[in-house]
Image: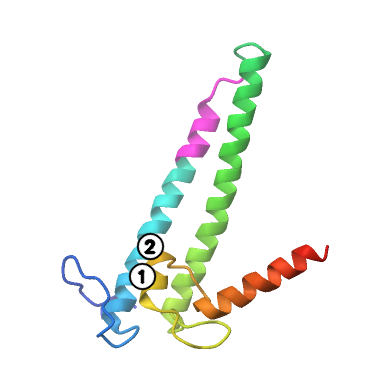
């Protein structure tokens, strides 16, 4: 796949006047997703390293309690990163399969602005709003 990658001009941004998900846009979002993923992986490594190098048996109960709270927060953040990395990986697969940028529910274009704001989006705005409404309705009935 590497051999047919598009070379982007410096500072390239997708434009509405271009064909939707043209090779330049696909490459732009691929780079955006890969860079985001790499940053999250690095932050996760730093979190693990911090937790491993921390001295645990120092300080009074209040200090230990504070440290445990901080560790718990770091682990929750790491878990969110893991889930986000999984979504990024799925988006990269959709890119490679030619499905990226199109709504899973309707097949319509998700739109450049939405993908720019949320590169892992799988639903167009209307479908996302319907999904959120269903979630709220299910949440109210429990």
Of the pair 78 and 106, the residue shown nearer to us: 106
Q: Are marks 1 and 2 in contact (CB under 8 Å)?
A: yes
Tell me, what colour scheme is on the image?
rainbow
Where's residue 89, x and y in %? 49, 66
| Residue 51: x %, y % from top left | 54, 32
Q: Which residues are magenta?
A: 46-56
Q: Is residue 53 magenta?
A: yes
Instruction: Examine the image and state in which quarter residue 110 appears.
Output: bottom left
Q: List the residue tagged with mark 1.
A: 30
- Is the magenta region chiefly helix, strand or loop? helix
Q: State the separation of the CA atoms marked 1 and 2.
A: 6 Å
Name the residue located 51 percent from the left edge and 82 percent from the top edge. 103
Q: Can you say whether 46 is above or below 30 in the image? A: above
82 on left or right of 68: left
- Badge 2 local density, few (<14 within 10 Å), some, or many (20+)? some
Q: Nearer the viewer, residue 99 or 41?
A: 99
Q: Which residue is mark 2?
A: 34
The C terminus lies in quadrant: bottom right
Give the quadrant of the N terminus. bottom left
Left or right: 10 as drawn, with respect to 24: left
Q: Is residue 80 left or right of residue 109?
A: right
Instruction: Find residue 44 and report its horizontal and vertical position in percent.
Output: 49, 45
Does residue 114 show up magenta in the picture? no
Q: Residue at x 19, y 65 (%)?
A: 11
């Amino acid at each position: 796949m590497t051999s047919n990658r598009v070379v982007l001009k410096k500072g390239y941004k997708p434009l509405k006047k271009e064909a939707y998900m043209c090779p330049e846009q696909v490459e732009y979002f691929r780079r955006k997703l890969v860079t985001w993923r790499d940053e999250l992986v690095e932050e996760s490594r730093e979190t693990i390293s911090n937790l491993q190098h921390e001295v645990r048996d120092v300080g009074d109960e209040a200090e230990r309690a504070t440290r445990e709270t901080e560790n718990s927060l770091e682990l929750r953040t790491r878990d969110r990163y893991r889930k986000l990395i999984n979504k990024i990986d799925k988006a990269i697969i959709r890119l490679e399969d030619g499905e990226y940028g199109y709504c899973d529910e309707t097949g319509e274009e998700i739109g450049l602005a939405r993908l720019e704001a949320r590169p892992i989006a799988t639903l167009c705005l209307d479908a996302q709003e319907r999904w959120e409404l269903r979630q709220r309705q299910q949440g109210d009935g429990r």
